[in-house]
Image (cartoon, rainbow, N blue to C red):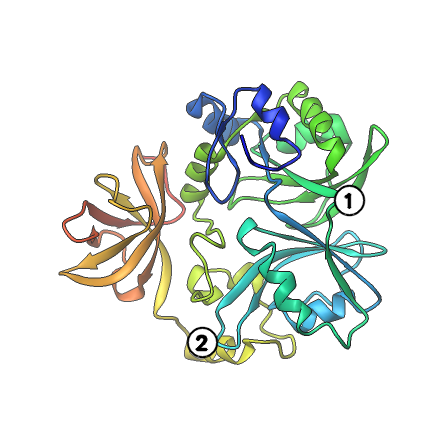
Amino acid sequence: MTTGTPLQPWSALRGAVAGDAAICPVAGYGDEAAEYAALREGAGLWDAGAWGVLRFSGPSRLSFLHKYCTQDVKDLAPGAGAYGCCLTVKGGMVADLRALAREDDALVLVPPAARAALPQHLAKYALFDKVTIAPADDLTLLGLHGPRAAEVAGAVLGPTPEGGPWSHAARAWSGHAVQVALAPLGALPGLHLVVPRDAAPGLADALVAAGARPVGSAALEQVRVEEGVPLFGVDLDERTIPIEAGLEAQGISFTKGCYIGQEVIARIAHRGHVNRTLAAVRLAAPPAAAQAPLLRDGKEVGAVTTWARSPRAGALVGLALLHRKHADPGTTLEAGPGGPAATVIALPVSPA
């Protein structure tokens, strides 16, 4: 394996197969059905070490971030967190982020595709603010998701924090400080554990002993698609306006002051809709490409961005960004010229 994460040797010893999915560098541990069941019924532990952990320090850390993201973060108290996006002047996404406010700094968690791009983007504006932005190279991330995630984490780390998504608390484990953050995956409960890199394998061992099962990207992608959670770098990019992906409820404050891209967001809010929307499609067969155009009567009306075999639907299901006129459930499309039928279905995916 060549993941480059602190869990690389740990995963290899447990028979992990390396993968190239953007969410997690491990494809799986040999039993995809059991890994999916752990996420849906128990607690699935996954290597989130490819995700970025950025440390914002200095007295202006939160007020600076507030000026350049879609969310109201300037008054976050220690232990509070928030989800938001940084945008281009055209309203396209540079990254989505999860900000965790602490006493002496703030940690910002970003998906793998944004771990280099976000600090580069923000560095252009940080010259005159009392803020330092740097990768937290001493830390890494573990993901723990499923209905028993809090129970398993509690057995090892103590009670999980209370509050809404991205609320967090520091917990002591084996002489290390671990930041435990509430991190749901759609409606699926879960946690992100920010842990010192050298402590990650030992903590993973303790979580498995408490009832977690290691899971890879194949099972994670099944759940992510079923829950309708888009991933930056796969379903979202610089051409995506957050409202198109349904991120406004959790990721945009419509009452805060100006930020880059705010004029575009305000115009859309005033107009009341966007031309594209996140949807799901049931696929009759695998598309010819990982990301395939969706056609209606020969005209491109969107694209499949991720697809996976959904145990809930009993079929292949893909996430797609579709023109809203073609996004009604039941609409039949074609995944690529001469490709398989793709029928629009509702999100989140319901059991068949």
Q: Quadrant of residue 212?
A: top right
Tell me the residue that label 1 is attached to: 169
The residue at the point 59 percent across, 35 percent down is 47
Q: Residue at x 80, y 42 (%)?
A: 170
Q: Nearer the viewer, residue 221 or 210?
A: 221
In the image as oriented, which residue stretches furthest toward the front?
Answer: 2
Front residue of 3/242: it is 3
Q: Secondary structure at mark 2?
A: helix
Q: Where's residue 297, x and y in %? A: 13, 61
Estimate the x, y position of residue 270 in percent, counting from the top left.
Answer: 46, 80
Question: Going by the image, does 251 lie left or right of 305?
Answer: right
**Side of 70 where 300 appears, left or right:** left
Label located before the other in sequence (2 or 1): 1
**Residue 285 — which label?**
none
Query: Which element carries disc 1, helix, strand or loop?
Result: strand
Identify the residue at horizontal 56%, vertical 26% (top origin).
214
Kindly identify the amino acid type of the residue bearing the numbered disc 1: Ala
